[in-house]
Structures are given as structure tokens and as C-alpha cells.
Image (cartoon, rainbow, N blue to C red):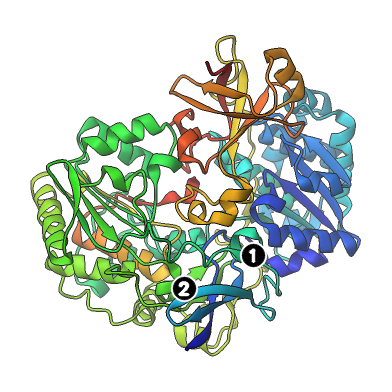
Amino acid sequence: MTNSIGEIENSDCILVIGSNTTGQHPIISGRIMRAKANGARLIVIDPRGIPLSQYADCFARIQPGTNVALANGLLHILFEKDLIDHDFIANRTENIDELKAKVREYTPEKVSRITGISPETLQEIALLYGRADRAMILYAMGITQHLTGTDNVKALSNLALATGNIGRPSTGVNPLRGQNNVQGACDMGALPDVLTAYKKVSDQAERKRFEDRWQASIPDTPGLALGEMMNKAAEGTLKGMLVIGENPMLSDPDSGHVKKALEALDLLVVQDMFLTETAQLADVVLPACSFAEKSGTFTNTERRVQLVRQALEPQGLSKPDWIIISELARSMGADDFTYESPAEIMQEIAALTPTYAGISHHRLESGESLQWPCPDETHPGTPYLHGTTFPRGKGLFFALDHIPPAELPDEDYPFLLSTGRIPFHFHGGSMSRKIERLNREAPTGQVDINPEDAERLGLEEGTRVTVSSRRGAISLPVRVSREVDPGIVFIPMHFAECGVNTLTDTRVDPVSKIPSLKVSAVKIEKTD
Amino acid sequence: MNEDFVLTTCPFCGTGCNFYLQVLDDQLVGLIPSKGHPVNQGELCVLGRNAHQFVQHPDRLTRPLIRKNGELLEADWSEAYQMIAKGFQKIRDEDGGQALGVLSSAKCTNEDNYLIMKFARSVLQTNNIDHCARL
């Protein structure tokens, strides 16, 4: 997030797009409700009717995969009504003319045809957002999990820049991140092209800083992203893989392809707490500790670095991941992996990572709560970003075009499938499905289908259906719900017995490499 | 009887709520939301409320496993490390680091992720490192 969770309450317009916040970030949706109580206006844009939409001042159901068209359409109206921040644009941004020329094409009528949102509603959204003093955009994977995921985020950034809604408290462009430490894993350079703090691995000077500290060489070309590794494994050119705390058999697109890839490896090592669907394919499985048996830090969605404290001894012979990696590195001859504690590892992180330079376990233990960037030991941390400048200097407007999703419904596969999450389970379910109380609430997956479609296909609540795509098929019960429009179905990702990623496509956004999990084409038939 | 309350961070979504794990003689018996925490202010969601419940589940892996004749069998740590080191070294030396890949985890700590990243780049000699950020 560019801003902080606590700032939500003081915003006077909140635009929630592609996030079922009540389901996936309930504590944050509580803050949104408090903002409402304080007088904030709430705009919700989603393909589905979600709990927050009932409380919205303006709710718009958007056709999946049309977010760039929507943002361009809103900017068209904002320019027309002169609801833009001329000072901010002049002082802090560049490329406004290109943006203006581009969004001129996106008239309300044209955008309405693409997005399914009426011209009147587009106008209402633009006025609510454009007239606010402090407007905050909150989004999640409904924005990012598209072939145009990067463009979608840039389009939201255009909106915030054009209205000067960034660089101040209670504004900004705010991704709500789905996993406890997805922010931290990215900050730490667990990505193919960057070291810590997003320093390019292809940059020789940056590489040298790490090489000097590590006394080892680092390859100079960016590596493969997750999906690309699976492709190379299936082709036989990637031969060994170490998978830690992750269950690609459930979470990655096209599970059949993932299985083929993992089975083709010469050596698959899985390090996890449970014998997941992925671990069952491994040559070696290493037992890892849970969060309760180790210490360290997680970085939350608002860049707050927080302590994880050990409460229990490791179960059985399991070990914390940092110890397993250290011991494995030493058994491969890397004698300097001799860390005595996570606090010592954080010292090395701080020495190499400008945004974490002032962060230490000692400061966190003494009760400080630090959000990066925290450049030195006396710095109090940064609740909101871009106050005076952007990382590149000026904020850049992008002139973007609407590109339709790659696989839309057709005669053979007439339904648009969107995947996602429900409140009672987490990601691939390897933790939450071990919890009896949660299984009682949500014992298995269901496919949400509109009553009109259900009636036409002769389906009732609980009818077992086979949902199939060009990749594969799964069988699961029907949930009849107006949360989805006719022609659209929704299936959650958590359930191995009806793993929705059997159906999804491996095509990815060319920049971020994110798969298009929010749009695939499927057909639905009664299971015999 | 020993009772302890340990302040820690929730392992589920990215909101970053804090709670106290309640430990009774080596057993996690419950948890209490942190009231003074700037993010959750005494609240927790249905996942967070139950975050202690999977930790001591009987299905937890408690020993390394090695596949022998098609079956995953219990092994000790040194045998597992040896087998992995030998396998990865062979691939690295014969085909280069680009024939190896590492998937790190958005559920692991910063310190875990940093070491995994360092291990991939400096020991395995590969930039093929990624995690489940996009999923």
C-alpha cells in the first residue's frame, strides 16, 4: 500500500475495486465501515455482488477484464468536468497530454458497452471520486490476476495522479495483499529479476554489493518466473527444484501441466509443514516449523515489519526454514551460512537493503512499529509514500488501451469462470483445512451460478455438476446465488478435491507474469 | 503447570494482525487479539481466531522423508541433506544453475526468504527464484 490501514478511517471517498474486502481482509473492511460512519462515500466496483456492495453509495457490476476501459472512461469524465488537480499534475507528473489524448476516445457510451456499467453510473463514480479531498483506492487480485494486470494497476495510478490523490494521508493506490508475508518475500528479493529492495540483479554495481558481502558470485541474467520454471521443467531443461511452503499443485494455473512438470524433474525437494499435494510428488520432503515454533519478521500489506515470536518448541524433528536452508547450504560447502538467530540475519538484510536499513529485532522488541522505508536507526518509519517525490522523480501517466481477455466464453465453453477465495479458508488450504471449525463452516468447494442459468440448466442448490475447460474438468456441488451475474460462475481456490486450477489457463501478463485467473471459459454439465 | 502468552503476528492474510498465543505446558490452547495493536485494535477474523489450531495437528510432518522404490520413507536429517546436496550439485555442475529452480514462500519470514534467496543465487548459482506472490 502507498498508505496505511489506519488512514482509511479519515478518507472521504473510498474506491474498492477487485477486492472482496469483507471476505479476504475482514479487519480492513471494518475500517472501511468506520470511514463510512465518519461520513466517507464508498464506491464498490466488482463483477460480483459482495458484502461491501450493500453499503456502497455507488455499486457497479463490471464485466470481468475491462478495468482499463473503466479507468479511461472515468478519466474522460474527470477531464470533461475539470475535476483534475492542475497544480499536482504540473508539479509532480509528466505525460499528461498523451493520457488526455488517449482517454478522449473512451466516451461514456463506449466504456459502457465494454464494461457493462451505465453512462450514468460512470458519471456518478467519477464525480464521487473527483470531488473528494482525500480519496483512497483499495484493490486486490480482481485487478491484478489478468493478462493486463500491470496495465490495470497503471490505470488506477493514472486516476490517483490526475486527481492529486497520492502522497498525502488517506489517499493513494493501495493493494491489499493476500498472504501474511507476500510483501516481505518481494522486499527480500525472492523474485527472479531483483535482489532485496527491488535492486535489479542485472545491475552490476548492485550485484557487486551483494557479492562483496556474500563472498560469492551471482549470475547476471534475470531468472525464470514460477510459471516459466514449470514450462522448462515440463520440457526437461529445468531438472531440480526446491519448493518451500508452497503448494503449486493447487495454487498454480493448469494443475495437469504442473503435475507433468514436477514429475519430470530429476530431483524435487519440498519443505513444508504437511504432506501437501506437491510434497506427495517429491523425492525428498523436509519437515518445516509453523509460525508458532520460530521467530523472525513478517511485513504486512502497509509495509509494517512485525515480529513473529516463538511460542512452542518445534514439533517432532521439524526445523525452522532458516535453519534448514543454513544446514543445506553448509552441506553444499557454503561455510558462511552460520547464523545464530533471525535477529542476526536481519542485521545482514539491513546492511544490504536501503528500505530496511534502520530496522532491527532490537527496535521491534522494544515496542517500535516500523513501516519501510526506514533508512536509519533513528528513523520512525514511513506511514505513506511519495510525499514529496516518486522513486523515478515525476509521476508518470500511461496512455493505455483496453485489451480484451484472451479466453472469453464461446459456444463450446459458454460461461466465464472467475476464481477467488472465501472467508473460511486460506489459499491452498494446507493450514486452514486442518482446522475443524473452519471445515464445519465450509467443508468443500462450490460453484456459484446465477438463478437464471441454474434454472435453464435444470440445476438446484447442491446439484453436483462437472465444470470443464480446455485444460481439464472438476466435479462439485452448485450454489445458486445472485452474487454472480448470468453467464458468470465463481469457484474458490482452496479445495484439492475440486481444485479450480485444473481449469485455469497458464497465459500470463507479459510484465508481471501473473496468470489470468479471473477470466477463463468453461462449460457446466450435470455429473452423471 | 506453565502458562504463557506470546505476542506474535497472524500467519494468514497480509493485514498483519497481532495476537497473543496462549501456551499451556507445551500445548497451544488458544489466542487473544492484541488490543493495543495499530492494525487490528482488539479484533480478529474467523481465520485469525483459529490460527492456533493447525499448529499441533496430527498430520504435521515430524521427520524428513526420502523416496525409495517409489515410496516416501522416514529418514534422518543428515541423509536427506546429503541426498539433496548431491543431487543439486550434480545438476549445477553438469547443466549449470539455470537447470535449478527455487520456489520460496509468502508464508515464510523475511529472514527465511532472504536466506532462501541468498542460497539460490550464491550456492545454487541460479536467479530462478520466485514465490506465490501472484497466486
Q: Decide which of B53, A318 is in the foreground and name it.
A: B53
Which residue is denoted by mark 1 in the rendering? A386
Q: Residues within 10 Å of mark 2 (few under 14, many from 20)?
A: many
Q: Residue furthest front?
A: B1
Residue displayed at 24% across by 70% down: A326
- Marks 2 and 1, Cα distance to the nearest angstrom? 25 Å
Relative to residue A350, is residue A144 depicted above or below? above
Q: Amino acid at mark 2?
A: Thr
Q: Chain of mark 2?
A: A
Nearer the N terminus, badge 2 or badge 1?
2
Q: Chain of mark 1?
A: A
Q: Residues within 10 Å of mark 1 (few under 14, many from 20)?
A: some
> Residue A297 got which mark?
2
Residue displayed at 42% across by 31% down: A254
- Residue A21 is left or right of residue B89, and the answer is right
Name the quadrant containing residue A409.
top right
Residue displayed at 39% across by 43% down: A248
- Name the front one of labels 2 and 1: 2
The tally of labels here is 2
Q: Is residue A88 visible?
A: yes
**Residue A383 in the image: x percent, y percent?**
65, 72
Q: Secondary structure at mark 1?
A: loop
**Residue A465 in the image: x percent, y percent?**
57, 22
